[in-house]
């Protein structure tokens, strides 16, 4: 078996991670990748029958998302560029619910699952169904509900950033949910058509591909994930990190989406528990989509985003949306005036 390429052999891992989780531009990503030994994408052609073939020991390699060379068709399915953001936000909420559910099971293995997502939110967060929110008034009880919802919303953050120099949008979706252990990231966060949710009626996702649609509208994406320490189920703690990009192979027409892998089995680069702590990475998952293409929706992006999240029944205050201060509003008002 080929040992995974070790990040720590090439970079001071904690420092590298500290920079990695701040990367919001293509320039930042390229600077990170330049520090690593990476086999050029045309030199390693992933073969699912024999992924070891052509693997250069001690290097990182670009591997198709879902370990499926023909993944572009499925990944390019989002019809509105804002939709993938709603998919990611839903995944984040599910990760927060799943953490509560798994902890409930730790305390009582026979506890029955909530029958619906709504039931889960009522049980774990003691919040009323969405359609009761408009009935909130100025009473102390209502204020308490609002405060609780705001507190919960802090665990899921959607940030929209506009880099003036590169004229590039970046969308970050971060949750403080259950996370995935480094060895599981490629089988979950980077899988296609596989879901961990099909038998969980208290979650929404079922197709195992919603989140991946974001790659199609991004120049680069990166992800880090760390599992909640009490829910590791025997897997090692630590943080996994990878970058996802669109690959156009030389002399071929079949483009695909690839992520940086550390081993032929698909594992992503990872760092130890101590390095994760040093870089201040706690449990949960962060996806950052860089060079985000909002298509013709250049103007009023935050309005569209708000609508997309509302349609997805996520309605703030269950999720906090922030935009990057002035630069983005300037961009929007300029485009509105054009
Ligand atoms: N924020 C997250 N935290 C932890 N695990 C996640 C997160 N997002 C995705 N996953 C894992 O990755 C898998 C794939 O996510 P994806 O959104 O592509 O599919 P899904 O949610 O299972 O189904 P759907 O396509 O209906 O959204 C999930 O089943 C889950 O195991
Ligand atoms: Mg999903």
Image: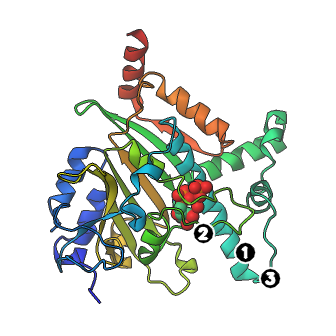
Mark 2 = which residue? 196
What label sits on residue 319 in the rendered view? none
Residue 4, by quadrant, is bottom left
Mark 1 = which residue? 104
Q: Are marks 1 and 3 in contact (CB under 8 Å)?
A: no
Position in image of residue 239 (x %, y %): 39, 71
Sequence-earlier tag: 1 or 3? 1
Residue situated in front as seen by the camera: 182 or 50: 50
Q: Is mark 2 within 8 Å of ligand 1?
A: yes
Residue 203, by quadrant, is bottom right
Residue found 37% across the figure and 20% down from its top: 330
Residue found 60% across the figure and 39% down from its top: 309
Residue situated in front as seen by the camera: 100 or 183: 183
Position in image of residue 221 (x %, y %): 35, 51
Position in image of residue 142 (x %, y %): 81, 41
Secondary structure under the numbered disc 3 in the rendered image:
loop
| Quadrant in which the N terminus appears | bottom left
Q: Is residue 201 above or below residue 221?
A: below
Q: CA distance from mark 1 to mark 3?
A: 9 Å
Q: CA distance from mark 1 to mark 2?
A: 18 Å
In the picture, measured across the screen, residue 13 lies left or right of residue 108, that is left
Sequence-earlier tag: 1 or 2? 1
Secondary structure under the numbered disc 2 in the rendered image:
loop
Q: CA distance from mark 2 to mark 3?
A: 20 Å
Residue found 60% across the figure and 69% down from its top: 196
In the picture, measured across the screen, residue 247 lies left or right of residue 331, that is left
In the picture, measured across the screen, residue 124 lies left or right of residue 218, that is right
Q: Quadrant of ligand 1?
A: bottom right
């Amino acid at each position: 078996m080929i040992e995974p390429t070790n990040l720590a052999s090439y970079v001071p891992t904690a420092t590298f991670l500290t920079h990695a989780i701040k990367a919001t531009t293509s320039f930042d990503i390229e600077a990170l990748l330049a520090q690593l030994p990476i086999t050029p994408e045309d030199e390693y052609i992933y073969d699912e029958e024999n992924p070891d073939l052509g693997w250069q020991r001690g290097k990182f390699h670009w591997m198709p998302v879902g370990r499926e060379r023909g993944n572009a068709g499925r990944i390019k399915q989002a019809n509105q560029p804002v939709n993938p953001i709603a998919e990611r936000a839903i995944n984040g909420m599910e990760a927060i619910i799943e953490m509560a559910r798994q902890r409930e099971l730790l305390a009582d293995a026979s506890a029955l699952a909530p029958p619906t997502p709504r039931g889960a939110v009522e049980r774990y967060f003691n919040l009323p169904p969405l359609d009761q929110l408009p009935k909130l008034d100025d009473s102390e009880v209502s204020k308490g509900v609002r405060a609780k919802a705001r507190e919960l919303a802090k665990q899921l953050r959607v940030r929209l950033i506009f880099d003036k120099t590169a004229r590039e949008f970046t969308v970050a979706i971060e949750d403080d949910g259950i996370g995935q252990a480094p060895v599981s990231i490629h089988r979950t966060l980077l899988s296609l058509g596989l879901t961990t949710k099909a038998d969980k009626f208290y979650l929404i996702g079922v197709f195992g591909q919603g989140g991946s649609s974001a790659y199609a509208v991004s120049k680069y994406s990166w992800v880090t994930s760390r599992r909640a320490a009490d829910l590791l189920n025997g897997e090692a703690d630590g943080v996994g990190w990878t970058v996802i990009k669109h690959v156009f192979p030389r002399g071929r027409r079949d483009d695909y989406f690839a992520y940086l892998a550390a081993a032929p089995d698909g594992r992503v680069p990872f760092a130890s528990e101590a390095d994760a702590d040093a870089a201040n990475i706690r449990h949960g998952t962060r996806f950052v989509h860089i060079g985000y293409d909002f298509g013709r929706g250049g103007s009023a992006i935050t309005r569209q985003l708000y609508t997309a999240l509302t349609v997805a029944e996520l309605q703030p205050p269950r999720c906090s949306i922030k935009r990057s201060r002035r630069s983005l509003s300037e961009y929007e008002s300029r485009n509105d005036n054009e």
